[in-house]
Amino acid sequence: MIPRKLLGNAQTPDGTGELQLSRRGDDFFISYNGRELMNSRMHGSEDMLAEFACKPIAARPRARVLVGGLGLGYTLAAALAVVRKDAAVVVAELVPAVVRWNRSLCGHLAGHPLDDPRVTVEERDVCVLLKHARSDFDAVMLDVDNSPDSMTQAGNDWLYGTKGLAHICRALRPKGIVTVWSAAPDRSFTQRLRRAGFEIEEKTVSARSCGRGGLHTIWVARRPD
């Protein structure tokens, strides 16, 4: 078997862990403290995260959407493929090295979505951005951790908790949508979404676009008013 080659590494801002970008043959991987978070072979659920959020608002003029977590760029690329040419897409990425990797090492995987003129990159915590947003977004896509039981960044507990969900609701425009990616179901998070006033669907999707591979969970939550 071809060994993996480490291409880059970066500490998380809270200093609790390290992200690594590696490559084996044509496949790229992002890991956290040696535990794989994502790879270029299985991104079907990341594509669906964007499609579930953006298709219902695709016809809205000057739609404004937020992608929380850049990863390997697949969610961003899928969102750009759906929204109009006059849309604005904001990417919030906590680790600046991930943005650099996408610009220099792995951007070709998703078709260099950061080069799209509709895209603005915010190298900061999506939690901070959402705390200050008021009816700013038609859709929000969150893929910032392995699940609502956060693993990579302690501050994500706030995002997935009652206060974070309330801020997300305020950040959405009327009938706006938030989608949340998770490696596994989480009944308590489903209940928190309902208590926050969202109309929700919980979808199980395949990790691979072809329908094979492991199963992931995506919550589709709509602001009703």
Image (spheres, rainbow, N blue to C red):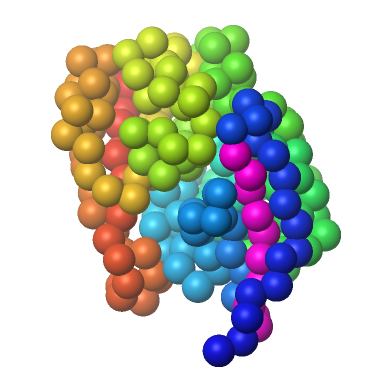
Q: From what the image shows, is residue 56 above or below residue 123?
A: below
Q: Quadrant of residue 73?
A: bottom right
Q: Is residue 19 magenta?
A: yes
Residue sitting nearer the eye, 216 or 17: 17
Q: Is residue 44 left or right of residue 119?
A: left
Q: Is residue 202 left or right of residue 111?
A: left
- Across and down, in percent, residue 113 comes to 69, 55
Q: Please state which of residues 154 and 66 is positioned toward the viewer in this rendering.
A: 154
State which region is magenta.
Answer: 17-26
Name the residue furthest right.
Answer: 104
Quadrant the N terminus occupies: bottom right
Residue 43 seen in the current view: yes
Quarter of the figure with residue 167 = top left
Left of 115 or right of it: where is 53? left
Q: Is residue 86 above or below residue 7?
A: above
Please name the predominant secondary structure of the magenta segment in the image. strand
Percent from the top left, x then y, of residue 184? 27, 48
Q: With 134 as the anchor, is 212 left or right in this view?
A: left
Identify the residue shown where x is 36% and y is 76%.
Answer: 210
Residue positioned most to the bottom = 1
Please state the horizontal and vertical placement of residue 48, each as a whole percent of the image: 40, 55
Q: Is residue 4 above or below residue 57?
A: below
Residue 214: in magenta span: no
Counting labels gives 0
Q: Quadrant of the C terminus?
A: top left
Depth check, front residue: 49 or 24? 24
Q: Residue at x 34, y 33 (%)?
A: 149
Q: Residue at x 32, y 14 (%)?
A: 162
Which residue is depicted at the point 59% across and 10% down? 132
**Residue 62 visible from this viewpoint:** no
